[in-house]
Image: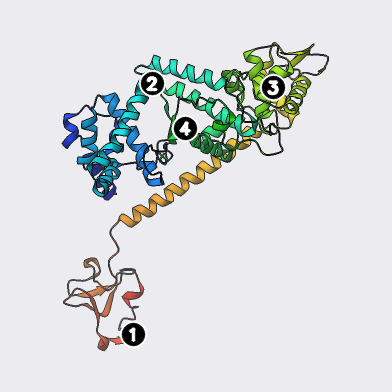
Amino acid sequence: MAQSGLSGHSREQSLRRTGLLTALPPLSSRMHKLLVLGDKDAAYERGNLQRGGKNTATSDHAWAMTRALAADAVRAGWNRSSFIQVMLDGPYKAGQHARTLQHRRGYDKASAWLQRAWDGAQHYIRSTDPISTRQDFHAALAAFRSRIECTPWKGIAGKTDLRNLIARMEICTQAGSWDHTVSERDLAERMGCSRTTAHNSNQRLLNAKLLRQLDNGSTTEGARWMLISRLPSTTSHHWSTPKGPEAGGAMSGPDVRQPDPGADIDSRTAGQLMHLDAFAHHGLGGSGLAVLAALAEQDGQSLTELRSSASISRATAYRQLEKLKSLGLIRHEGELYHLSPTALEGIGTQTPDCTDPVSGWPQAAERLGSAGTSARRRKHHEAQRVRWHHEQARLAERRRAASQEPLPHPAIAQPEHVRADGCAIDPATGAPITGLYVASDGCWVWDESESVDGRGAAGQPEPFQSSP
């Protein structure tokens, strides 16, 4: 325990602004930690490929860290020469790759590499709107939400990634920043899916550069993430879910990755409904959720319009519309489909296609066969959390025991087990052990002349067989 406290104190000492940093405007706390200690949490291992250099895992990681530091240095008011001096002349972990490049290929090559990172960071800062207040963030989040709503999320994987982004946007709204903290289990419960499904979705969003993991969390808090607000220019399934729909399944075909400008849903409606049992995988699923969200955004759409706005195939559209009509949540008038007046509350109305409408989302889940899914999921996650805390407590106890002083060697005499005349005392009974004495080196010594068959004259057992 004392060692951990010492290491924490030394870490605080190393994070102080000393040396070259004292004369420069301070970086943000996260970037200052990245500069001094390096990427301890591997948050930048999935960075962009560097320009004008050899692309390897190490160089790409170093390029991503350097670009992030350059962007924060530009915001803080540094100049190019100060940035290059800090990276090359300072003892900071984030500049190790630049210093290695300087050692191997000279100062000019290392300086040119840092200049490319600085120029790219300057261009990025100039091309983005600065967020200096909470109001600016909410305006940027609203713009990001509108782009998400108008992006086609095709296939099961696409609908899962849409749920993921919607859940994260709600968390960011409460946090007031793109940085947010959430565990995979909490995220899965918000999305209405399993933890494995949420984990796979996170990996797709990380690969698509829509998400960045800042750390791995702790025993009491979830991992920290950053939602990337800049979307690629091509709004297609290619960047949203690199896995893509399975071959031969729904939405498969040559045009699956083509942009679809007709996509348009209400993400807030989807966020309010997606955790319910009725929208589990074996219920309405993500496609049924997309149909309701599309009709909530614009009521009265034809089948062709719904296919485009909800980003679903013709077969999926027919299947989901039949389910929703049988529940009394939508009605079919001519070629258009309309939401029932209380459809978003799960209360249906009688129509020619439904004589027994549902009276709420729990009843809808019972008819769809997905009732109790969220309760079972929460129970399973809670059991996992309990096992996790028990395991952490067990490991902490082992570390605590290892940090304590080791037990004395049994051959060394302890003062509480020795009488004033030097004779040993049995720790179990307090009776003297005849023939056992303390030698000049402080260890036990046995007088064979006073023992009989390995036992003392008083019939006491040898002290080596009992705890001292």
Q: Secondary structure at mark 4?
A: strand
Q: Position of residue 208 (x, y in %)?
A: 50, 34
Give the Cα distance between marks 1 and 3.
93 Å
Give residue 307's mark: 3
Q: Indicate the amino acid at tag 2.
A: Ser
Q: Is residue 308 above or below residue 443?
A: above
In the rendered view, tell whether residue 433 sits above or below residue 89: below
Q: Looking at the image, is mark 3 or mark 4 earlier in the sequence?
A: 4
Q: Nearer the viewer, residue 428 or 221?
A: 221
Amino acid under disc 4: Leu
Q: Which residue is mark 1?
A: 454
Q: Residue at x 25, y 24 (%)?
A: 77
Taking depth in this image into account, of 100 and 229 the one nearest to the observer is: 100
Quadrant where the C terminus is found in the figure: bottom left
Is residue 407 shown left or right of residue 19? right
Circle 1/circle 3 CB separation < 8 Å: no
Label 1 packing within 10 angstroms: few (<14), some (14-19), many (20+): few
Q: Is residue 286 left or right of residue 388?
A: right
Q: Nearer the viewer, mark 1 or mark 3?
A: 3
Q: Neighbour class for label 4 at 10 Å: few (<14), some, many (≥20)? A: many
> For residue 377, what is the image quadrant?
top right
Q: Secondary structure at mark 1?
A: loop
Image-based side of 213 in relation to 152, left or right? left
Gap in angstroms between the C-alphas marked 4 and 2 = 20 Å
Where residue 245 appears, x then y in whole percent? Answer: 65, 35
Residue depth check, mark 4 versus mark 2: number of the one nearer the observer: 2
Tell me which residue sits at (31%, 55%) in the image: 403
Q: From the top left corner, tell me how far across and down residue 332 is, in percent.
A: 78, 14
- Name the image quarter holding residue 5: top left
Location of mark 2 (residue): 127
Q: Secondary structure at mark 2?
A: helix
